[in-house]
Each structure stands twice: as structure tokens, then as C-alpha cells.
């Protein structure tokens, strides 16, 4: 799991989760965690927007999204809501930033077993 800090990886391995990243290059990173407790699966998600700067920081986005997903899994919440409408964004955001997120197209998805890197 390249790009994640060691402490976060250790926490993911401890919980024995399967990790998936959905990366929309230049815009956002979404992390999905799947955990099995007994016979039931729990899925948590975390979302990080990386479009506030000109340079897309994949590693920082992965760390934020994975941390938020882990927090959601621990707290048994549904994770963070993905913004999909103009009204969902803070008033401080520029039109360009919002358009960039809403009009993003290319997605990259990868699944990893926590701690294995594969």
C-alpha cells in the first residue's frame, strides 16, 4: 500500500481489512475498507478532495481518505458523503474548484489486502 504512512498501515493490518482506492487523478481520492466480523461484512468509506492546489498529491489524499474510512469503520458510521451538487460545497470554494470536482471523469480503482501491498 504505497503512499500510506506506517502508523496507518499498522492500524489497517490490526483490523484485518481489505482496502480499495478509487482515484480520480487531479481531483479526489476515495478509500473503501471492507471488514469481516463473524459472518457479516462491514464497508466504510472515506473521501479526500485534492483539487484545492494545482499539484495533485496522491499520497496525501490516500492518507486522508484511508484515515477517514478507518474512523468511520471504528465508529460504525456510513463514512463521508461524496459531494455531487453545487450546494454540497463550502461557500469559500471557487467555481473552478467545484467544476473540477463535479466534471471529473477518469477513475482508477485498486484493491489491496492491508499490509501485503498487493
Image: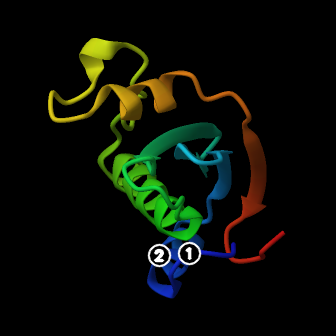
Q: Quadrant of residue 4?
A: bottom right
Q: For the point 53% across and 43% down, which residue is it?
A: 27
What mark, if any, has residue 30 been given in the picture?
none
**What x and y, as percent, mark residue 56?**
54, 58
Label 2 CA crowd tier, 10 Å (few <14, some 14–19, many 20+):
some
User: In the rendered view, does 72 fall on the left or right side of 56?
Assistant: left
Q: For the point 60% across and 29% down, which residue is it?
A: 104
Which residue is at the front of the view, 62 or 76?
A: 62
Q: For the point 36% across and 46% down, which residue is it?
A: 72
Q: CA distance from mark 2 to mark 1?
A: 7 Å
**What x and y, as percent, mark residue 80?**
36, 36
Would residue 81 be seen by someone viewing this image from the given angle? no
User: In the rendered view, does 13 fall on the left or right side of 87?
Assistant: right
Which residue is at the front of the view, 97 or 110?
A: 97
Task: Give the structural element (helix, strand or loop) at label 1.
Answer: loop
User: In the rendered view, does 3 fall on the left or right side of 63?
Assistant: right
Q: Identify whether 90 is placed above or below 9.
A: above
Q: Quadrant of the C terminus?
A: bottom right
Task: Give the structural element (helix, strand or loop) at label 2.
Answer: helix
The furthest residue to the left? 91
Q: Quadrant of the N terminus?
A: bottom right
Q: Which residue is mark 1?
A: 4
Which residue is at the front of the view, 39 or 43?
A: 43
Label 1 CA crowd tier, 10 Å (few <14, some 14–19, many 20+):
some
Q: For the point 39% across and 31% down, which residue is it?
A: 96
**What x and y, as percent, mark residue 5?**
50, 81
**What x and y, as percent, mark residue 61?**
49, 59
Q: Which residue is mark 2?
A: 8
Check contact, mark 2 vs mark 1: CB within 8 A: yes
Amino acid at each position: 500500500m504505497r503512499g500510506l504512512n506506517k502508523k496507518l498501515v499498522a492500524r489497517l493490518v490490526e483490523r484485518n481489512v481489505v482496502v480499495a482506492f478509487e482515484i480520480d487523478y487531479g481531483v479526489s481520492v476515495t478509500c473503501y475498507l471492507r471488514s469481516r466480523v463473524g459472518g457479516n461484512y462491514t464497508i466504510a468509506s472515506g473521501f479526500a478532495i485534492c483539487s484545492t492546489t494545482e499539484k495533485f498529491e496522491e499520497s496525501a489524499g490516500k492518507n486522508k481518505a484511508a484515515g477517514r474510512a478507518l474512523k468511520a469503520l471504528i465508529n460504525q458510521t456510513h463514512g463521508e458523503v461524496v459531494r455531487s451538487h453545487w450546494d454540497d460545497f463550502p461557500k469559500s470554494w471557487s467555481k473552478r474548484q467545484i467544476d473540477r470536482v463535479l466534471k471529473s471523469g477518469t477513475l482508477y480503482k485498486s484493491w489491496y489486502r492491508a499490509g501485503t501491498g498487493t
